[in-house]
Image: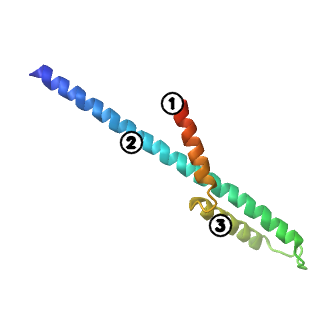
Amino acid sequence: MSILTSTAQMGAGRVDMRESEDVMEKKKDMALKKSCQDFEGVLTSIIIKQGMKSAQEASFSTDTDDERDNGSKQYIEMANEQIGYHIGRNGMLGLGENLYNSLKSRMQEIKK
């Protein structure tokens, strides 16, 4: 009976290993998706920052850089970063999702 018990335990161990491999694969997949969303957020923040910089340079405002205080500049930069982060986390542009799909398919090709 000990041989049967050992065989059953080994079989159960294999199932547990498969389940843990599936869990690890899901964790890797979630990490990849989050990284792609974060990348979209960073890229969007950079685009917004450059767009705002160009808009400020082209504005007909009489304010010069010396007349604006550092606090308002930092506030605007932080707001732009948060807007970019929000856009990226919610996949509004779809860049993160496209990157994720591309990387995931390439990872699957490599495993084969």
CB atoms at circles 1 and 2 under 8 Å apart?
no
Left or right relative to 4: residue 36:
right
Proximity of marks 3 and 2: CB atoms separated by less than 8 Å:
no
Q: Residues within 10 Å of mark 1 (few under 14, many from 20)?
A: few
- The disc labelled 1 sits on which kind of residue? Lys
Q: Quarter holding the N terminus?
A: top left
Which mark is in front, 1 or 2? 1
Circle 2 is placed at which residue position? 23
Name the residue at 64% across, 60% down: 93
Q: Where's residue 65, x and y in %?
A: 87, 71
Q: Residue 56 sits in which quadrant?
A: bottom right
Count numbered badges in the picture.
3
Q: Say which of 50 and 108 sits in front.
A: 108
Q: CA distance from mark 3 to mark 2?
A: 33 Å
- Does dot 1 land on a helix, a strand or a loop? helix
Indicate the position of residue 92 as horizontal and vertical percent values: 61, 63
Q: Earlier in the sequence, mark 3 or mark 2?
A: 2
| Amino acid type of the residue tagged 2 in the rendering | Val
Badge 2 element: helix
Judged left or right of residue 47, residue 87 is left
Q: Earlier in the sequence, mark 1 or mark 2?
A: 2
Residues at circles 1 and 3 in contact by the CB criterion of under 8 Å? no
**Residue 109 rendering spot, x and y as whole percentages:** 54, 33
Q: Is residue 66 left or right of residue 97?
A: right
- Nearest the viewer among 22 and 64 is 22
Q: Is residue 108 above or below residue 77?
A: above
Q: Residue under circle 3?
A: 83
User: Residue at label 1?
Assistant: 111
Give the residue type that dot 3 points to: Ile
